[in-house]
Image (cartoon, rainbow, N blue to C red):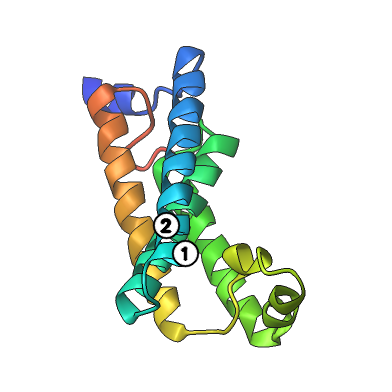
């Protein structure tokens, strides 16, 4: 087995877990702040809708990393994309819109109405973020890459 392949299967442990979780927490705070800015301060346009969807997908990815910092980037991305798609499909029930009318902050988590374009935005954004995370982890040598799953 090549040295790179052995290194790629080394799990995140100890300080690496703490650091990864801390970076995820900071990232969540920054991205949520950016999302709130887009949602409250910018005009409602197609561009701000797309930006909001992308920021939501980034937060979903970071939340998975925060909860499971040892998880390989492709798996974290799969879970995050799954969450985003599930939430978007849940909008087809009409419940998020009803609940949002009664308690407006729920709209920030569940949205309101289904938009097929959002599915593409979520999946593409999560794929880009997971790939970037995987590259950064490989560069630092602190995570799994090359298909490691454990």
Where disc 1 sits, the SS reads: helix
Q: Which residue is mark 2?
A: 37
Residue 40: give its label: 1
Residue 126 visible from this viewpoint: yes
Q: Looking at the image, which residue is at 32% across and 28% down?
A: 8
Which residue: 67% across, 81% down? 97
**Nearest the camera: 25 or 88?**
25
How packed is label 1: few (under 14 Cα within 10 Å), some, or many (20 or more)?
few
Q: Where residue 9 sits: x, y (%)?
A: 38, 27
Number of residues whose C-alpha sits closer than 10 Å to that of mark 2, classed few (under 14), some (14–19) or many (20 or more): few
- Position of the N terminus by quadrant: top left
Q: Going 23% across and 28% down the picture, which residue do you hit?
A: 139
Residue 87, horizontal then vertical, whole percent? 60, 70
**Relative to 48, is 15 on the left or the right?**
right
Figure quadrant of residue 119: bottom left
**What residue is rendered at 41% in x and 38% in y?**
148
Residue 145 placement (x, y as % from top left): 33, 36
The relative height of residue 66 versus residue 122 in the rendered view (above or below) is above
Q: Is residue 41 above or below residue 68?
A: below
Q: Nearer the viewer, residue 146 or 85?
A: 85
30 with respect to 99 (left or right): left
Number of marks in the rendered image:
2
The vertical placement of 41 against 120, above or below, is: above
* Left/right of residue 86 with respect to residue 6 in the rendered view: right
Q: Using the numbered discs, state the Cα–Cα distance from disc 2 to disc 1 in whole angstroms.
A: 5 Å
Up-down relation of residue 88 to residue 1 (above or below): below
Query: Is disc 2 in contact with disc 1, using a CB cutoff of under 8 Å?
Result: yes
The quarter of the displayed image where residue 88 is located: bottom right
Of helix, strand and loop, which one carries label 2?
A: helix
Residue nearest the observer in this picture, 19 or 8: 19
Can residue 1 be seen in the rendering of this structure? no
């Amino acid at each position: 087995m090549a040295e790179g392949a052995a290194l790629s299967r080394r799990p995140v442990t100890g300080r690496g877990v703490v650091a990864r979780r801390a970076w995820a927490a900071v990232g969540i705070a920054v991205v949520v702040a950016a999302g709130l800015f887009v949602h409250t301060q910018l005009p409602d346009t197609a561009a701000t809708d797309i930006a909001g969807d992308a920021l939501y997908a980034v937060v979903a990815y970071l939340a998975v990393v925060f909860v499971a910092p040892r998880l390989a980037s492709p798996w974290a991305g799969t879970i995050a994309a799954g969450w985003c798609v599930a939430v978007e499909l849940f909008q087809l029930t009409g419940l998020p819109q009803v609940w949002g009318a009664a308690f407006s902050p729920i709209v920030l988590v569940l949205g309101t109405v289904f938009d097929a374009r959002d599915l593409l935005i979520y999946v593409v954004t999560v794929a880009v973020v997971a790939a970037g995370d995987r590259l950064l982890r490989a560069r630092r040598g602190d995570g799994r890459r090359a298909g490691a799953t454990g």
